[in-house]
Image: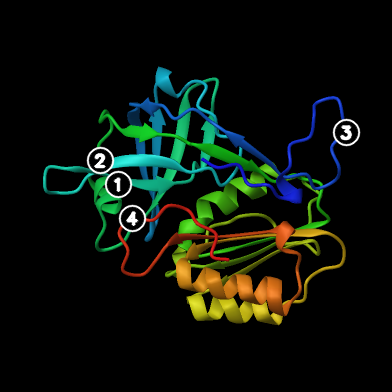
């Protein structure tokens, strides 16, 4: 893939100190892997957790909370299709990978997650790269719909305990509002029930003082509106913003894209 020349993404020679908030982009060699399903768990009405294990997962490079791996699943017509998923958690030494699938009425990956059994073999590939967002910002906003929640959960777990975090998350059922973190003066979670309410909640909040990073992911049209709201209306620097379309209404396959 083409390397983009951008001040926020420039590589810094190893002997030079990194400036604050230095975002790094790392490319990985794509490998196909065939781990075994060792656990299937229904977490809530909309989420299924699947644990995968295998020697070929050892060393899988998942360096960022929003890495994407390809999961290959049957399409019901004798063919194999792939969908992008963010690793919820990963132990590279033990070769254990945790994925969360959003359950919905129509979708090859959702169907697979609801039918897969312990002992079945999975087929994965990637990730093709990692975008490593540093942990030295003054605050973080994490925004998204159900498809973004695995990445949001992982990011919260990886950030320092004293990090200032605001989460704005949309889910379809109250039972999907799983515990993310204890609410304190510096850590807040705002749950909403629709994409319109997601944007309304963001609109109502003021950006905190200091340097912060805004991360968002979800339905493409909503993410385009979110970027407009964060960067244009609220004036947050685009260098400190990553908002991605994880899916689009009517589309069956979509690579992660930034709806700028």
Name the residue beneath numbered marker 1: 113
Left or right position of 74 against 155: left
Viewer-side residue, 76 vs 93: 76
First in residue order: circle 3 vs circle 1: 3
Which mark identifies residue 64? none
Q: Residue furthest top?
A: 55
Viewer-side residue, 180 vs 213: 213
First in residue order: circle 1 vs circle 4: 1
Give the alpha-carbon distance from disc 3 to disc 4, as whole Å: 40 Å
Where disc 2 sits, the SS reads loop
Name the residue beneath numbered marker 4: 253
At horizontal 30% and vertical 46% (from top left) the residue drawn is 113
Q: Badge 4, how many Cα within 10 Å: few under 14, some, many 20+?
A: few
Where disc 3 sits, the SS reads loop
Q: Residue 37: which quarter of the image?
A: top left
At horizontal 32% and vertical 63% (from top left) the residue drawn is 251
The reply to whether dot 2 and dot 1 touch (C-beta < 8 Å) is: yes
Q: Nearer the viewer, mark 1 or mark 4?
A: 4
Name the residue beneath numbered marker 2: 116
- Residue 32 rendering spot, x and y as whole percentages: 36, 28
At horizontal 59% and vertical 72% (from top left) the residue drawn is 226
Viewer-side residue, 202 vs 246: 246
At horizontal 59% and vertical 53% (from top left) the residue drawn is 152
Name the residue beneath numbered marker 3: 17
Q: Nearer the viewer, mark 2 or mark 3?
A: 3
Where disc 1 sits, the SS reads helix
- Please, which colouring scheme is shown? rainbow
Q: Nearer the viewer, mark 3 or mark 1?
A: 3
The reply to whether dot 2 and dot 4 touch (C-beta < 8 Å) is: no
């Amino acid at each position: 893939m083409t390397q983009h020349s951008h001040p926020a993404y420039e590589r810094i020679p190893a002997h030079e100190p990194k400036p604050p908030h230095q975002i790094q982009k790392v490319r990985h060699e794509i490998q196909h892997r065939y781990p075994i399903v060792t656990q299937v768990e229904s977490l809530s009405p909309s989420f299924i957790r699947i644990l995968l294990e295998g020697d070929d997962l050892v060393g899988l490079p998942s360096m960022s909370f929003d890495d994407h791996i390809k999961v290959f699943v049957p399409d019901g017509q004798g063919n194999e299709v792939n969908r992008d998923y963010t690793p919820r958690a990963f132990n590279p030494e033990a070769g254990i990978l945790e994925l969360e699938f959003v359950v919905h009425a129509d979708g090859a990956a959702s169907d697979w997650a609801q039918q897969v059994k312990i002992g079945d073999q999975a087929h994965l590939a990637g990730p093709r790269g990692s975008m490593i967002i540093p942990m030295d910002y003054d605050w973080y906003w994490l925004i998204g719909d159900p498809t973004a929640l695995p990445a949001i959960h992982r990011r919260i777990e990886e950030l320092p305990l004293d990090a200032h975090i605001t989460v704005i998350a949309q889910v379809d059922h109250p039972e999907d509002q799983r515990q993310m973190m204890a609410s304190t003066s510096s850590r807040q979670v705002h749950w909403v029930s629709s994409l319109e309410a997601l944007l309304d909640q963001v609109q109502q909040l003021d950006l905190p003082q200091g340097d912060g990073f805004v991360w968002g992911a979800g339905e493409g049209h909503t993410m385009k509106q979110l970027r407009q709201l964060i960067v244009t209306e609220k004036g947050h620097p685009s260098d400190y913003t990553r908002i991605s379309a994880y899916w689009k209404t009517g589309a069956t396959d979509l690579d992660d894209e930034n709806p700028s």
